[in-house]
Image: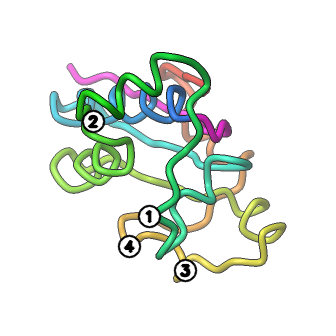
Amino acid sequence: MSRKISIVCVSGTREKLQMAAMIASVAAATGDAVSVFFSMNALTYFIKGNAADAPAEGEFGTLMAQKGVPPFRQLFKQAAELGDAKLLPCSMALDLLKITKNELDPDFGPPTGLTRFLSDSEDGQLLTF
């Protein structure tokens, strides 16, 4: 029986985005139903053409970059492509940032409101980063 895992990403720091991406990719690859909701500071890293690195929160974030750990963008992409994880942009954040869904990485699904995301996450595990 697969689990239902819902992940909320609001942080713009490398460590938090990395952990969310690792959980999403491993869970999706093992057959779990995964939905990731991107809002606030996390969403800007997925605008097409934004190659900026998320700032490290501490020493571990710097160490991951030095040791060649697969970056969070790549892991989220793998989760969507290989495990069919849903990557969902926050509709409110899109409005505030004045960007459209078409300006996001192509792996992203439709803009979603928080109320809808939480409703869809019912009866599953909810993680926040």
Q: Residue at x 45, y 27 (%)?
A: 62
Q: Place residue 106 in its image quadrant.
A: bottom left
Q: Specify the amino acid type for callout 4.
A: Pro
Q: CA distance from mark 4 to mark 2?
A: 17 Å
Q: Secondary structure at mark 3?
A: helix
For label 4, count other residues whose C-alpha is less than 10 Å away and answer few (under 14), some (14-19) or many (20+): few
Amino acid type of the residue tagged 1 in the rendering? Phe
Residue 26 placement, left or right of 90 = left
Question: Can you give x and y, in whole percent of width and height, for residue 42 in the image?
Answer: 62, 47
**Mark number, residue 60:** none
Q: Which mark is residue 106?
A: 4
- Give above or below for 46 relative to 15: below
Q: Which residues are magenta?
A: 1-13
Q: CA distance from mark 2 to mark 1?
A: 15 Å
The quarter of the rendered structure image containing the C terminus is top right
Q: Which mark is residue 25?
A: 2
Are the two marked residues, 1 and 4, in contact with CB atoms closer than 8 angstroms?
yes
- Mark 4 lies on a secondary structure that is loop
Residue lying at 31% horizontally and 31% vertically, measured from the top left: 66
